Amino acid sequence: MSTVATGGTPFWGSEFAGKSVFVTGAGAGLGKAIALELAGAGAKLSLLDRSADTLEKTAKEIRGLGAECITFTGDVTDAATVKKVVQQTASKFGRLDLAVNNAGILGELTGVENYPPETFRRVLDVNVMGVFLCLQAEAQVMLAQGGGAIVNIASVAGLIGWGTATAYVASKHAVVGFTKTAALELAKRGVRVNCVCPTFIMTDLTVDFLGKPEVQSAAEAVIPAGQLGTPQSVADTTLWLLSSRASFMHGAAVAVDGGYTAQ
Amino acid sequence: MKRLDGKVALITGAGAGIGRACMELFAQEGAIVVGASRTKGPLDEVMAGIEAAGGKGMVMATDVSKEDQVKRLVDAAIAKYGRIDVLVSAAGVGWSWGEKSPGSMNPTHTTPLDKWHEVIDINLTSVYLLARFVIPHMIEQKSGSIINIASVVGMRGLMDSHTYTATKGAILNLTRSMAVTYGRQGIRVNSVAPGFIATAMIAPALPAFEDINNPIVPAIPRPGRPMEIAYGCLYLASDESSYTSGSALVIDGGMTARI
């Protein structure tokens, strides 16, 4: 069911043409959809992911659209790697205009009384520490160059609770709060920070549980839109927040959830 | 390519400020625009500018707090264009209304009952009336996007303009109820929550921006531009927000990112 963006929404004109963008977790799922959409709009892409194979597949599709793309294999939880990768991106492309901090893991779906502490720690490390380390490195470059825009991929789990997803919910709430603080600090200095809160979207991260028919229909039954979201809709919203059209948006959390959190 | 090619957009508060910015932007993006507000003069001016730039549409002087006038407006749009794809409810009165209608922007214990009803009618009843008459058409079309202009002060308390804050909070939640109800019929309903935007409504408050320590001054120390709100409305009107419903799009320069 996962439909990845084919790249190249026709609406953006020259908005993203020649802009350099850094995307984490770009090998698959939402990160891949966002990277493809930006590539289709004329941006230059720098991608970070743990898996070299999936990364190369995404890069190939991006280059197939005629866009420039560099890739880095590494883990967002490694401060030294993140800093090096962001700086190499800025040197290669001349500047870093935009960034999407998307890399994240789900962890387990287990009751709080049994949730393994090591898994909880790992979820926090990737989802919170990883976003912080990436944003810090991006902000250093963007502040020095006079501006930029960053979008963090949070989740509706950053706005509400979700039974058995203890670590994921805690981590995504942290991302939303972190987004607001970063926005407050960086706004006057030309860097805009916002986040997107998607709900049940079929991706490689979610296919293990959303892929089960009874889970999918249960999810669809509780979403006012009556269907799961697609990576395309998250990509479209992310591009809006990265664009100059969102010039007065700072610290916003935009839900892409078919009305789920309106209930 | 234009985002709203072939779409019909009904926009209230169209003579000035945010509503006017929406008229101009949506027409640029290919929509047929139907503009309404209380007085004809500013509407004609907006439409003349739009037509000069190659855009299309119509305007109708309408008091959107009155049921018969809202019905007449919607019927006229349908009669001429056959459909309404986007509804932007941007009509409303705020701080500057306190000068025209003394007592209307007061705190609770000094707000006369007739002023309470007046502000409720203009700001909130209008949102309900427009949605009430437009939704049946969107149900038949199996598609539509409704955008209600609320405010960040619909999410926070203020020390005056209590009625105004009540109407904006109500708009945020009415939006959610509409979103959860009409989602499966292809209708999306969202709010925009602007911060301080440089329009006539907040002219009395503008001097506060000279002191960046004043709490109303956001992280970006300037009022927003009406077009910055119109762009948010454009996102919500377009297919790029196809999975966004029941949300409040906060466009406030970071004002509510903190306490």
Image (tube, coloured by chain):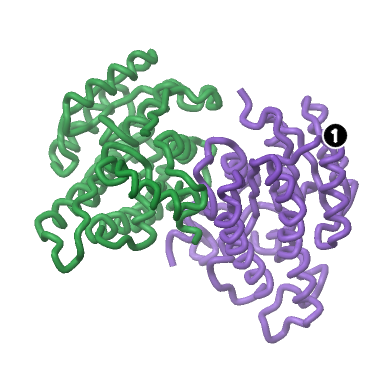
Chain colours: A green, B purple
Residue A147 in sight in this render = no
Question: Residue A5 is drawn in which quadrant?
Answer: top left
Look at 11% across and 60% down and name the residue there: A117
Q: Above or below — where is B122 with respect to B56?
A: below
Disc 1 residue type (three-letter): Ala
Q: Is residue B50 left or right of residue A26?
A: right
Closer to the camera in the image, A222 or B75: A222
Q: Is residue A62 left or right of residue A259?
A: left
Q: Position of residue A161 (x, y in %)?
A: 34, 63
Which residue, as the protein is rendered here, is positioned at the far front?
A214
Q: Secondary structure at mark 1?
A: helix
Q: Position of residue B123 (x, y in %)?
A: 73, 63
Residue beneath disc 1:
B48
Q: Is residue B91 left or right of residue A27?
A: right
Question: Residue B177 is drawn in which quadrant?
Answer: bottom right
Look at 76% across and 50% down and name the residue there: B12
Q: Position of residue A106 (x, y in %)?
A: 24, 49
Quarter of the picture containing the N terminus of chain A is top left
Q: Residues within 10 Å of mark 1 (few under 14, many from 20)?
A: some
Look at 65% across and 43% down and name the residue there: B144
Q: Chain of mark 1?
A: B
